[in-house]
Image (cartoon, coloured by chain):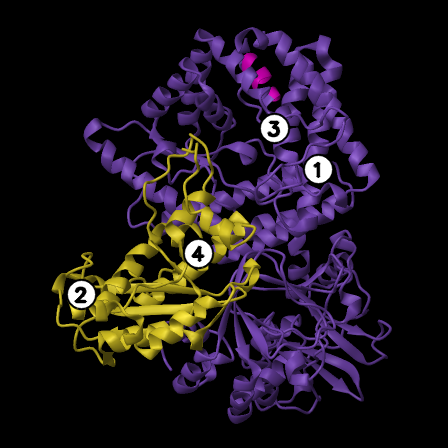
Chain colours: A purple, B yellow
């Protein structure tokens, strides 16, 4: 029975193998049998050693992580259109890996009962499956099938995350494409084409005696030095440069550079006298070092589509995890990660502007506020942003504003696609209230400073951490100096800001026990952001604004600057700087552990040491709050 | 006078109604996980319950966070009342190549389909009232199902702060955008029902209600809220 939903399902499936091979009619019939499944973040779809379900899955939206149970290392991430959980059904065995929703996901479950006959009937579908199973998904030589079906991945490969990436063993292709020295050039070129590889190994008695790459063919055959009817022997490069299989990435890179070659042949003991077991291409190395900030940065800048950026961002998260595991100083980590985040947002804006029918009519600046503005956003958290554009004549304001609102909503939508949640308070450039011309922004900020009610204090505390992510810096400088001018004229504003900073609920109760949330979505969790991070951040902001310094946004750096400006409080400020870094690190580790923002912490999951660490920072929070109280005479206002 | 009394007597109700009504005698699942939902959308000729008529009913079953495609419901109704303007929105043109059934037939099929499941819709009362009006035309009582409105529930997922200006009404488009649901097939009954179903799943995930009663209660705005 065909209906609107089954049509939608088949519309989706027909873009992805093996469904693209099916006849329209078969696909329509199959689509009717599909079940649409919604999975919340981190919910398990199936677990290791579980008896296979009667269906396999294709990711419609979101992402699914495949991993060994209990291990942090993720084997594979299935994205939109990727299939998982099929192999055990075909092989009649239990699941070998655990599948977990890596983010909120929608899956299509396809019953094996309906699919199997199709696979048997249609040889192309069958071949696709055999091919995918045979070439373990991670094989870069079958790049186009990557991630579509998961095989039993070699357990030795699983331990790749967390170690310093440069000393990681490389992953190489074990699916050797070979020919003998008597193979004709046409034949070997055909073999290379069907296997979709850039090089072929010439073997004799199982030993590699030569190698032929695309470059050899180009240089020797197409220049007519050697006719196409000649044999492999005449074009191959020999002898082959061989290396042992347990090469690290750094070693592989060095080897390629040294001999100026793009493929390495790996043999049993590293000499040409043992059988070849694998080929390592430059491409493999590039993929492996993808987890290095410089490569990631280049990948971000080269990205032409939002989907690519989404994948790169996972690399950034992996990098972050590696850094934290190795205890690299958080200041350095947050610098690198923020730079990468910044570049990502910039690239998103660039892509969106390119896609807009109209170019920006005037100069503008994309402001990032909140944690990203303070360079404290290590995980993907909410997006807070705003647009500031050049003044335009009144007659043009409406039109200009409309353009930037459209730009704002497109960018926020794409940011959401790559993993930044929408701001629940809608403090985003897509909102009319956060998209203004310079004069309008001046008016808005003046109003906040001159009429500091609770809302105004809240709004300014979020807004005043802005940085320019994209666009014209001079516009922003004008706004900043305007803000300081107003603050100087209305010193009372700082007092209100200070009292706002003291409004955050206390982290501990009377008996020094943690205070947990009483109800709602996060009942019985400790709100790390609200009760510990925010007081530190808010206090730093008031103090730094009272010194009229705008260029520093990072909380830890603000405290360091304060220590410099007020030597009498140096010790307190330095411990604040330390505490804010410790809290941020704590949040990031918790977030990575649970694949969320790390804001809400289950106290029973913490060990004693972690709890003590956390409590130690609370003392500093209390001290800095007392300093605010005294300095800004907050009590007198609160009555 | 006699006719009037006769009409009220349940004895005259057709069997499919009686079958439907007896389902409500059974106890309802206490665990929210085991609740079955029927997510519903209707396309109509207009917004007047008296004059306007349903053109299409689309519905799907949502159970254990799963939607089985073959368990979906889609019927097109043959109506004499026809409005060119709304046809433009819905794209249901009268001579399209689908099977049309009478209103009574559609109601009968729907009652068999819906059972005692919870009816979910975006601004669900409009659809329920539309069906009730049709039931009344065929001298049948009103629907007995419990209802959930994703429009009302969505408001509760929003941050409760003066900083955020809430809209009076949130359209299905707003929800689709917020939860990044594809807006393909928007304005077909079953397509809208699918968007509504996925939005409901997101909302339940956000609100984390204790049970069905709690979820139904959450449709009401906060007492001292904004």
Tell me if mark 4 has few (under 14), some (14-19) or many (20+) residues whose alpha carbon lies within 10 angstroms of its own.
Answer: many
| x and y percentages locating residue A521 in the rendered image | 57, 44
The local crowd at label 2, few if under 14, some if 14 to 19, many if 20 or more residues have their Cα within 10 Å, is some
- The Cα–Cα distance between marks 1 and 3, rounded to whole angstroms, is 14 Å
Q: Which mark is residue B87?
A: 2
Q: Is residue A466 left or right of residue A3?
A: right
Earlier residue among tags 1 and 3:
3
Residue A438, quarter of picture: top left
Q: Is residue B49 left or right of residue A582?
A: left
- On whether disc 1 and disc 4 are found on a single subunit, the reply is no
Query: Against A348, is A32 above or below?
Result: below
- The chain under label 3 reads A
Which dot, 3 or 4, sits closer to the camera? 4
Task: Return the chain for callout 2.
Answer: B
Residue plotted at (56% across, 72% down):
A57
The magenta stretch is: A539-546
Image depth: mark 1 or mark 4 in front: 4
- Asked whether the residues under the numbered discs 1 and 2 touch, taking CB atoms below 8 Å apart as contact, a structural biologist would say no
> Disc 3 on helix, strand or loop?
helix
Same subunit, labels 2 and 4: the answer reads yes
Q: Distance between the Cα atoms at labels 3 and 4?
A: 32 Å
Q: Which residue is mark 3?
A: A534
Above/below status of A221 relative to B61: below
Spot occupied by residue B223 in the image (x, y as percentages of width and height): 43, 35
Q: Is residue A559 left or right of residue A352?
A: right
Q: Which residue is mark 4?
A: B199
Q: Is residue A540 magenta?
A: yes
- Main secondary structure along the magenta-highlighted residues: helix
**How busy is the neighbourhood of tag 1: few (under 14 within 10 Å), some, or many (20 plus)?**
many
């Amino acid at each position: 029975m065909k209906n609107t939903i089954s049509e939608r399902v088949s519309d989706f499936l027909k873009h992805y193998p093996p469904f693209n091979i099916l006849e329209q009619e078969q696909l329509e019939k199959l689509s009717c049998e599909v079940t649409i499944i919604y999975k919340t973040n981190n919910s398990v779809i199936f677990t290791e050693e579980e008896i296979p379900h009667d269906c396999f899955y294709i990711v419609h939206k979101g992402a699914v992580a495949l991993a060994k149970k209990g291990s942090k290392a993720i084997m594979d991430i299935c994205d939109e259109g990727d299939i998982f959980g099929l192999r055990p059904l075909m092989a009649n065995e239990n699941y070998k890996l655990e599948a977990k929703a890596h983010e909120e996901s929608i899956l299509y479950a396809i019953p094996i009962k309906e699919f199997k006959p199709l696979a048997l009937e249609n040889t192309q579908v069958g071949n696709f499956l055999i091919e995918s199973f045979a070439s373990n998904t991670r094989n870069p030589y079958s790049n186009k099938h990557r991630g579509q079906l998961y095989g039993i991945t070699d357990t030795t490969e699983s331990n790749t995350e967390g170690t310093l990436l440069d000393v990681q063993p490389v992953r190489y292709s074990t699916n050797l494409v070979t020919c003998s020295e008597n193979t004709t050039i046409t034949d070997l070129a055909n073999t290379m084409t069907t296997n979709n590889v850039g090089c072929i190994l010439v073997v004799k008695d199982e030993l590699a005696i030569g190698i032929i790459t695309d470059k050899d063919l180009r240089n020797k055959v197409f220049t007519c030095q050697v006719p196409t009817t000649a044999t492999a022997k005449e074009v191959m490069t020999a002898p082959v440069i061989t290396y042992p299989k347990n090469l690290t990435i750094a070693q592989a890179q060095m080897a390629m550079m040294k001999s100026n070659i793009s493929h390495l042949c790996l043999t049993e003991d590293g000499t040409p006298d043992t059988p070849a077991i694998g080929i390592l291409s430059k491409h493999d190395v590039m993929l492996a070092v993808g987890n290095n900030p410089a490569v990631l940065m280049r990948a971000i800048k080269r990205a032409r589509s939002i989907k690519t950026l989404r994948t790169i961002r996972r690399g950034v998260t992996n990098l972050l995890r590696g850094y934290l595991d190795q205890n690299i100083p958080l200041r350095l980590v947050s610098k690198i990660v923020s730079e990468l985040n910044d570049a990502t947002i910039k690239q998103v804006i660039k892509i969106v502007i390119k896609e807009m029918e109209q170019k920006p009519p005037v100069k503008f600046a994309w402001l990032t506020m909140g944690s990203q503005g303070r360079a404290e956003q290590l995980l993907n958290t909410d997006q807070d942003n705003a647009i500031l554009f050049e003044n335009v004549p009144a007659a043009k304001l409406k039109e200009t504003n409309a353009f930037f609102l459209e730009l704002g909503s497109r960018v926020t939508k794409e940011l959401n696609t790559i993993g930044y949640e929408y701001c629940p308070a809608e403090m985003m450039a897509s909102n009319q209230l956060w998209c203004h011309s310079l004069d309008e922004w001046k008016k808005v900020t003046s109003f906040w400073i001159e009429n500091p009610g609770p809302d105004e204090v809240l709004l300014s505390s979020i807004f005043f951490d802005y940085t320019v992510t994209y666009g014209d810096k001079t516009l922003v400088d004008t706004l900043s100096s305007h803000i300081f001018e107003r603050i100087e004229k209305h010193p009372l504003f700082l007092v209100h800001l200070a009292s706002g900073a003291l409004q955050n609920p206390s982290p501990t109760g009377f008996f020094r026990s943690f205070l947990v949330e009483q109800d709602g979505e996060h009942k019985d969790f400790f709100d790390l952001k609200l009760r510990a991070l925010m007081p530190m951040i808010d206090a730093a902001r008031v103090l730094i604004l009272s010194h009229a310094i705008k260029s520093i946004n990072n909380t830890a750096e603000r405290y360091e600057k304060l220590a410099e400006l007020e030597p009498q409080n140096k010790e307190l400020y330095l411990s604040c700087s330390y505490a804010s870094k410790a809290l941020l690190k704590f949040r990031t580790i918790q977030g990575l552990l649970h694949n969320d923002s790390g804001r809400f912490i289950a106290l029973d999951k913490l060990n004693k040491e972690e709890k003590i660490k956390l409590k130690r920072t609370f003392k500093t929070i209390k001290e800095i709050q007392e300093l605010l109280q005294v300095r800004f005479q907050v009590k007198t206002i609160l009555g | 006078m006699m006719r009037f009394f006769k009409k009220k007597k349940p004895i005259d109700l057709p069997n499919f109604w009686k079958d439907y009504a007896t389902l409500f005698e059974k106890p309802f699942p206490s665990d929210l996980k085991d609740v079955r939902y029927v997510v519903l959308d209707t396309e109509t000729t207009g917004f007047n319950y008296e004059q306007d008529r349903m053109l299409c009913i689309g519905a799907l079953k949502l159970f254990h966070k799963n939607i089985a495609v073959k368990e979906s419901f889609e019927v097109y109704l043959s109506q004499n009342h026809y409005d060119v303007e709304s046809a433009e929105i819905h794209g249901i043109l009268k001579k399209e190549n689908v099977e049309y059934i009478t209103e009574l037939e559609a109601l009968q099929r729907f009652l068999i389909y819906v059972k005692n499941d919870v009816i979910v819709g975006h601004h669900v009362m409009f659809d329920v009232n539309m069906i009730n009006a049709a039931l009344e035309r065929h001298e049948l009582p009103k629907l007995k199902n419990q209802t959930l409105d994703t429009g009302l529930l969505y408001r509760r997922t929003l941050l409760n702060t003066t900083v955020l200006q809430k809209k009076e009404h949130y359209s299905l488009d707003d929800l689709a955008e917020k939860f990044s649901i594809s807006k393909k097939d928007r304005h077909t009954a079953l397509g809208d029902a699918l968007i509504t179903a996925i939005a409901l799943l997101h909302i339940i995930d956000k609100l984390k209600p204790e049970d069905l009663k709690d979820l139904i209660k959450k449709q009401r705005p906060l007492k001292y809220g904004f």
